[in-house]
Image: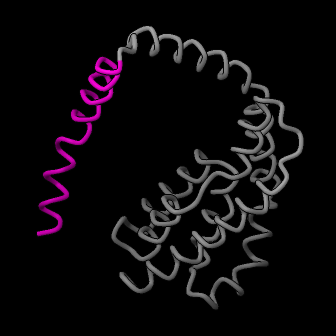
């Protein structure tokens, strides 16, 4: 019953949003098209500003993986993760997710191709992907684009949230599918 209700809602959610936002703007007497184009122009400017930070982050991640540091870290930490029920195969996903969404998606795709989408590993990787954030990417790109030098509590808060998301993903996957 719940799945049927969610399927019915999901069919109409996007069209509703696409109609509701301009309608709301129209009734509030906002020039919707002009506001949209101004936002798009500002978004393009921001995209150009973040390119150097994005390149630096992607090069760093490439060096981390190509040097073999990822494999060394996985071998060192996998006995500990085994204690909470996280298979060693999922650990690269857990390490990569705070660094890069694209890198994490690549690892997740590889895990799903190797182990299957319905396997515990595939499901755990999928849950991890949805319950964590690309913390370092956000700090490097978005904070860098607006010239924030001192991230203050953003890094510890982001990493704590990622750790909670990872542990929760492992627990949920093991409870639901293990």
Q: Based on the displayed image, in which of its 4 quarters is residue 94 positioned? A: bottom right
- Compared to residue 104, the image places residue 150 above or below, namely above
Horizontal side, residue 144 vs residue 134: left or right: right
Q: Based on the displayed image, in which of its 4 quarters is residue 6 positioned? A: bottom left
Q: Residue at x 52, y 78 (%)?
A: 170
Horizontal side, residue 123 vs residue 98: left or right: left
Where residue 69 sits: x, y (%)? 81, 61
Horizontal side, residue 130 vs residue 45: left or right: left
Residue placed most toward the observer, 133 or 87: 133
Quadrant of the rendering where the C terminus is positioned: bottom left
Where residue 83 sits: x, y (%)? 64, 91
Where residue 25 sits: x, y (%)? 35, 21
Quadrant of the rendering where the N terminus is positioned: bottom left
Q: Residue at x 57, y 70 (%)?
A: 90
The prevailing secondary structure element of the residues shown in magenta is helix
Q: Residue at x 22, y 35 (%)?
A: 16
Provide the residue span drawn in magenta. 1-28
The colour scheme of the drawn protein is one colour
- Compared to residue 76, the image places residue 112 above or below, namely above
Q: Residue at x 78, y 70 (%)?
A: 73
- Compared to residue 35, the image places residue 10 above or below, namely below
């Amino acid at each position: 019953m719940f799945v049927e209700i969610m399927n019915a809602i999901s069919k109409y959610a996007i069209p509703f949003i696409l109609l509701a936002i301009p309608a709301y703007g129209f009734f509030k007497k906002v020039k919707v098209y002009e506001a949209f184009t101004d936002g798009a122009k500002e978004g393009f400017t921001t995209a150009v500003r973040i390119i150097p930070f994005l390149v630096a982050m992607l090069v760093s991640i490439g060096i981390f993986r190509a040097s073999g540091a990822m494999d060394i870290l996985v071998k060192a930490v996998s006995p500990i993760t085994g204690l909470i029920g996280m298979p060693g195969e999922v650990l690269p996903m857990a390490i990569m997710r705070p660094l890069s969404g694209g890198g994490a998606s690549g690892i997740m795709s590889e895990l799903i191709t190797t182990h299957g989408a319905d396997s515990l590993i595939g499901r755990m990787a999928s849950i991890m992907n949805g319950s964590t954030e690309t913390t370092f990417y956000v700090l490097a790109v978005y904070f860098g684009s607006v010239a924030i030098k001192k991230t203050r509590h953003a890094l510890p808060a982001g990493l704590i949230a990622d750790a909670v998301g990872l542990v929760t993903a492992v627990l949920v996957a093991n409870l639901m599918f293990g």
